[in-house]
Amino acid sequence: MFDTHELGRRPGAMHKVSRSVPAPKDLGLAEVIGVPEGVTVELDLRLESVMEGVLVTGTAHAPLTGECVRCLEPIERELDAEFQEMFSYPDADTRTARKDEAGDDAEDEDTLVLEDDLLDLEPVLRDAVVLALPMQPVCQDDCAGLCAECGARLADDPDHRHEVTDIRWAALKDLKPQSGADQGADENQEK
């Protein structure tokens, strides 16, 4: 929670905030990549008072851990996620009267509201970080992955190969090539 009391309700008032906060649980993409729970997330924020509420612009810097989707090796990186979000005053008339089929106000669901001059940045931070994460993280751009036959990491042995015969050609494997003399005898039998 961040306190916006210093801004008052004076449009144009601005306040910069730098804060280190612990990462919330499940800040990432399932088990593939994410920010570990409890690590320090560095936030640099600019809080601006506007007519309807407080505009928050900021950057989150956090360490990432995960695994390569090709070779399953551990990955450790740094992430910078930028975000901007409007937090409305509770009494601001910014909501539209548009109704959806259920009769609920469609805009209320997406509107973030200040509560007692405090704003909860976690949902905004979660959205910004998840959208900034790579969907298919790899340890290197040219990662060759794992061998489909035995699971060996191909980057460790670039010449790794298996002698594999296509099942459609397996019956031909047992046929032996004929020598030149045998081939001539076969031609004479055909005549």
Image (tube, rainbow, N blue to C red):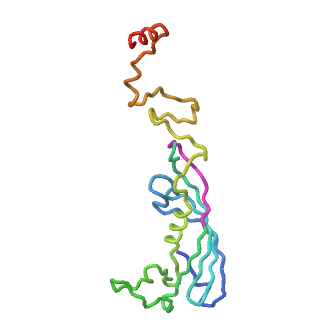
Q: Nearer the viewer, residue 5 or 154?
A: 154
Residue 74 lies in the magenta stretch: yes
Q: Does residue 25 appear left or right of residue 41 in this picture?
A: left
Is 128 above or below relative to 96?
A: above
Q: Which residues are magenta?
A: 71-81
The image quarter in which residue 63 lies = bottom right
Quick one: quadrant of the C terminus? top left
Q: Position of residue 44 (x, y in %)?
A: 64, 69
Q: Position of residue 31 (x, y in %)?
A: 45, 52
Question: Residue at the left extreme?
Answer: 102
Q: Position of residue 145 (x, y in %)?
A: 53, 41
Q: Nearer the viewer, residue 190 or 6?
A: 190
Q: Does residue 15 appear left or right of residue 180 in this picture?
A: right
Q: Main secondary structure of the magenta part?
A: strand
Is 176 above or below relative to 101?
A: above
Q: Which residue sits at x=42%, y=30%? A: 166
Q: Which residue sits at x=50%, y=70%? A: 122
Q: Which residue sits at x=40%, y=18%? A: 175
The image quarter in which residue 150 lies = top left
Residue 48 lies in the magenta stretch: no
Q: Nearer the viewer, residue 6 or 51?
A: 51
Is 16 above or below relative to 153?
A: below
